Image: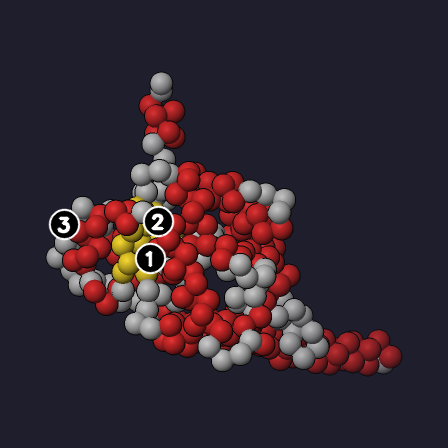
Amino acid sequence: MSPMQSAESDKSIRVIGAGLGRTGTKSLQAALDLLGFRTYHFPLPAHSAAWAACAEGTGSVAAAIQTAVDAGYDATCDQPMADTYAEQMDMFKNAKVVLTVRDSPAKWAVSWRVLADFIQVQERPFSFWYPSFIQWIPFMRNWKKMRNLLGVHFGLKPGELVRGFRNQPEGWLEKQYEAHNDAVKRHVPKDKLLVFNVKEGWEPLCKFLGKDVPEVPFPNVNESAELKRAIIMMKTVSYGWIPFVAGVACVSLVAIDVIGNRVRK
């Protein structure tokens, strides 16, 4: 076997993050990277078509997961990777699973709504009242299709977890959070599973993965603040082009009028 073939055969996922989004997955990503892993947090634009195909039934889960492996990642977290933890376990028998959790289902639900507000702005189609070009971008459309996968593995309808929850009774989101976590705990052997709140810091994670505790604080990434800023930014971009176009149009009309006057003279 050539060195190149050997390197390709060594590619695998070693750590599977099975926690839903908004359970500290960005902090987990940063922590795993500090421990020497290369962690896949969300499908890259170049991989979005494979995930969209998976969601639409024209591609496989394995093919979508493989895009991350082929790109050199050996750890995963966040969704849709968390939704495919079982498939990853089948593909990578030696992988360990980290189930990130929040202090309570209620705290997770509050945080999930912040993410859902961000997604709602990102996925909104172009209209007179909302002149956004975001969904004209191919990978953005693919991400929208991909999100139909979220929650399907524990019985939800496509897209229900991220869009349909607004029509559900109070407490529905909390029940879905618990349903996912219960499914992971049932499916993953205890010796391969760490239920982990990022507030616990390095000790349980390093012990589980057989790593030395780094001499730096455990990363604490406040993604909620980032999402709120991103919502404002996307709305600004969506509406911001209108004054620019209006200004260009006015300048053009004035220029045409000046030229017309000169021609008439």
Secondary structure category for the residue under label 1: strand
- On screen, residue 195 versus residue 181, left or right, reads left
- Specify whether 200 is left or right of 256: left
Could you tell me how far apart the alpha carbons at marks 1 and 2 are, in whole angstroms?
Answer: 10 Å
First along the sequence among labels 1 and 2: 1
The residue that label 3 is drawn on is 212
Q: Earlier in the sequence, mark 3 or mark 2?
A: 2
Quadrant including the N terminus = top left
Q: Residue at x 67, y 79 (%)?
A: 129
| Residue of label 1 | 99
Give whichever of 157, 216 is nearer the camera: 157
Dot 3 alpha-carbon crowd within 10 angstroms: few under 14, some 14 to 19, many 20 or more:
few
Quadrant location of residue 253?
bottom right
Q: Is residue 38 left or right of residue 165?
A: left
Q: Dot 2: within a 10 Å radius of its alpha carbon, few (fewer than 14), some, or many (20 or more) residues? A: some
Query: Can you give x and y, in whole percent of width and height, for residue 59 in the image?
Result: 59, 43
Query: Which image quadrant is residue 259 in?
Result: bottom right
Mark 3 vs mark 2, CA separation in Å:
25 Å
The three-letter amino acid code for the residue at tag 3 is: Asp
Q: Quadrant of the C terminus?
A: bottom right
Q: Nearer the viewer, mark 3 or mark 1?
A: 1
